[in-house]
Image (spheres, rainbow, N blue to C red):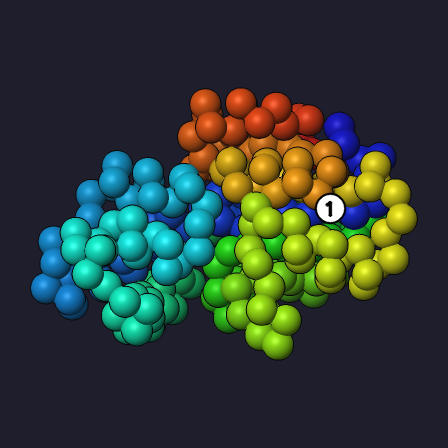
Amino acid sequence: MMNHYNYYLFDYDGTICNTFPTIHSAMSQTFKKNGLNTIDEITMLAAVSKGGALHDTIRHLHPEASKLNFDDVEAIAKIYREQYKECDEKLTALFEGAAAVFEKLKAQDKTIIVLSNKGIAAVERSLKALNLFDQTDLIIAEGAFPDLALKLKPDPMVYETIITQKFNIKNKEEVLMTGDTHADILFANNCGIASCWAAYGYGQKDACEVLHPTYTIQEISEII
């Protein structure tokens, strides 16, 4: 049990929600529309396990990544976002116990922050559909604060410039970051806060364990 913390930071993909079927379907359809081969599950999972932003994932998967400029990648990303939106509600599901964790944390007056390298529109839409939006105190995702040019995980910028300021956090021992990839654990380490590796998600075991997470869980309900 980890209920002695007051601020709970959660990654989204692979931690709260099982989005892999959605990501795989959307990316495969995107590549197909661009005249490329669809992506097998193993290759897709390897890309997702890095916990990177969409542009990074596209470059990782694209067979001619070295020839793509920013506008090329953004054009592909636009198609992906459209495809993702189409299949999100049908394919994305909460991990068992996630809703109960959020409910119990809020009943204990804890602060819940969802922190994702995914686009803000997709995260907000999904949390609303899954009835977790109203229980979330803050969502930080790609594009959430365009005027600030925020760096994403594992850079500690969002923690230092937004989270600590908004919630007036003085003691780092009150904060726990839970996520499934090395980007999440490294983010926690960079922030100087406790980390919880969600081993049931998409992260690579060796890459996460070498960062020495404070806790390791096999299902999200173990947090409470």
Quarter of the image with the C terminus in it: top right
Residue ID at (37%, 54%) = 56
156 vs 45, left or right, is: right
Image spot of residue 148 (x, y percent): 63, 71
Residue ID at (49%, 32%) = 200
193 vs 92, left or right, is: right
Residue ID at (80%, 55%) = 164
Mark 1 falls on what kind of element? strand
Q: Nearer the viewer, residue 97 or 152?
A: 152
Residue ID at (42%, 63%) = 89
Q: Is 207 rendered above or below residue 180? A: above
Image spot of residue 18 (x, y percent): 45, 46
Image spot of residue 105 (x, y percent): 77, 46
Please state which amino acid type lies under the numbered disc 1: Tyr
Quarter of the image with the N terminus in it: top right
Q: Nearer the viewer, residue 32 or 97?
A: 32
Is residue 179 at least partly visible in the picture? Answer: no
Reading the image, the residue beneath label 1 is 8
Give the class, few, some or many, for how many residues have Cα within 10 Å of label 1's Cα (few <14, many ≥20). many
Q: Is 19 rendered above or below residue 118? A: above
Image spot of residue 61 (x, y percent): 25, 50
21 vs 211, left or right, is: left
Figure label count: 1
207 vs 171, left or right, is: left
Residue, far bottom:
147
Is residue 139 at least partly visible in the picture? Answer: yes
